[in-house]
Image (cartoon, rainbow, N blue to C red):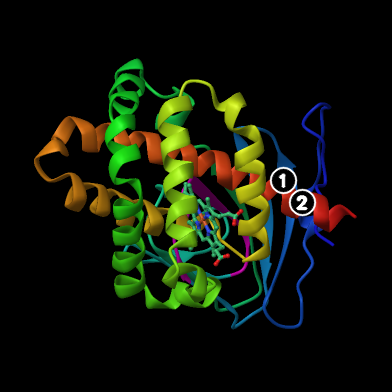
């Protein structure tokens, strides 16, 4: 079970070397500390194991404690050895290989643009698109799934394809996007909806790193359907708004997963 070592309410000190445990193969990870802004994990990779290439929606920092390995960050190889510190911006593809048993601390931070909150300008623009989203919502979400299943066919396995064919899923997504546009400045009102969707996402194994995929396809679909109405201003506002919504889901889904692990 993956328990958190320290609570964010009380002071805490540990000798990290005492917490290192290597599995015989693969990796072992432990949450050291987590608060609303940052999560610190201890990662212990057995010699010769690897973490396949992936992205994260959050900025992250690796600090190597012991061992040797390699991180490929945005196509560039960086040698990992004790004391090496690597900053990985959100969405930067990275993969890790351990040559020897390798231990590092991974600190993940909230996306800096989100900490500032959504700007009033974005709120106003997104709200102004609500009527057009109501009118074209299903067309946009149907187009979004078309783009996603074409460009990222591997995600199809997570979906009930009959709910796609009969239009149920595009309608559900359109309703969610429209509700978000109308309540972007009052997320409390969306709590029930977010909760229901987040539970469905957990059931279908949606991962944080898949949010940029849906974001890219949804924004493309908005542009395709709205045509000239999708001005640069509208697209910038929706990019910011989507990231904020993705963060809400990612956090809620992480909570649901953690509660399930703790029980
Ligand atoms: C902010 C972004 C997203 C929104 C607004 C959203 C919205 C929704 C909604 C409204 C549902 C239906 C829930 C229900 O049946 O009660 C749903 C289900 C689902 N979503 Fe998302 N979603 C988002 C991101 C993602 C991402 C990143 C993925 C990953 C590929 C994903 C995959 C799924 C899957 C697999 C289902 C279940 C579909 C089924 O039953 O066939 N969603 N989502």
Q: Residue furthest top?
A: 120
Name the side, left or right, on which 45 lies relative to 215. right
Q: Position of residue 188 (x, y in %)?
A: 61, 25
Q: Is residue 59 magenta?
A: yes
Q: State the CA–CA distance, disc 1 to disc 2.
A: 5 Å
Q: Residue at x 53, y 63 (%)?
A: 81
Q: Quadrant of residue 131?
A: top left
Please state the extent of the stretch shown in magenta in the rendering.
Answer: 53-67
Q: Quadrant of the N terminus?
A: bottom right
Q: Residue at x 62, y 66 (%)?
A: 204
Q: Are marks 1 and 2 in contact (CB under 8 Å)?
A: yes
Q: Position of residue 32 (x, y in %)?
A: 75, 47
Q: Is residue 21 magenta?
A: no
Label 2 Cα neighbours within 10 Å, binned few <14 / some 14-19 / many ≥20: some
Q: Quadrant of the C terminus?
A: bottom right
Closer to the camera, 130 or 101?
Answer: 130
Q: Quadrant of residue 71?
A: bottom left
Q: Residue furthest right?
A: 263
Q: Residue at x 62, y 68 (%)?
A: 67
The answer, for residue 256, to whether it is visible in the render is yes
Q: Position of residue 50 (x, y in %)?
A: 55, 77
Which residue bears the numbered disc 1?
A: 255
Element assignment for label 2:
helix
Q: Is residue 121 above or below residue 262?
A: above
Disc ID at residue 258: 2
Q: What's the magenta bit mostly, secondary-structure-wise? A: strand
Q: Quadrant of residue 51?
A: bottom right
Disc ID at residue 218: none
Q: Residue at x 22, y 33 (%)?
A: 234
Name the side, left or right, on which 24 lies relative to 87. right
């Amino acid at each position: 079970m993956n328990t958190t070592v320290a609570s964010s309410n009380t002071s805490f000190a540990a000798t990290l070397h005492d917490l290192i445990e290597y599995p015989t193969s693969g990796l072992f990870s432990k949450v050291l500390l987590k608060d609303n802004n940052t999560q610190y994990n201890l990662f212990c990779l057995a010699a010769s194991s690897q973490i396949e290439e992936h992205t994260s929606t959050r900025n992250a920092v690796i600090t190597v404690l012991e061992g040797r390995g390699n991180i490929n960050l945005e196509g560039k190889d960086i040698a990992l050895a004790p004391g090496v510190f690597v900053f990985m911006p959100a969405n930067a593809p990275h993969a890790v290989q351990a040559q020897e048993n390798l231990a590092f601390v991974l600190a993940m931070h909230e996306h800096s643009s989100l900490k500032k909150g959504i700007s009033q300008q974005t709120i106003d623009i997104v709200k102004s698109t609500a009527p057009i989203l109501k009118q074209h919502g299903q067309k946009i979400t149907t187009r979004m799934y078309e783009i996603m299943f074409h460009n990222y066919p591997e995600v199809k396995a997570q979906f009930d394809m009959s709910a796609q064919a009969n239009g149920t899923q595009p309608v559900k997504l359109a309703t969610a996007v429209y509700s978000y546009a109308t309540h972007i400045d009052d997320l409390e009102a969306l709590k029930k909806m977010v909760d229901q969707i987040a539970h469905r996402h957990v059931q279908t194994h949606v991962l944080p790193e898949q949010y940029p995929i849906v974001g890219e396809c949804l924004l493309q679909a908005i542009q395709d359907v709205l045509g000239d109405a999708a001005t640069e201003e509208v697209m910038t506002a929706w990019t910011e708004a989507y990231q904020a919504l993705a963060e809400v889901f990612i956090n809620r889904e992480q909570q649901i997963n953690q509660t399930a692990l703790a029980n």
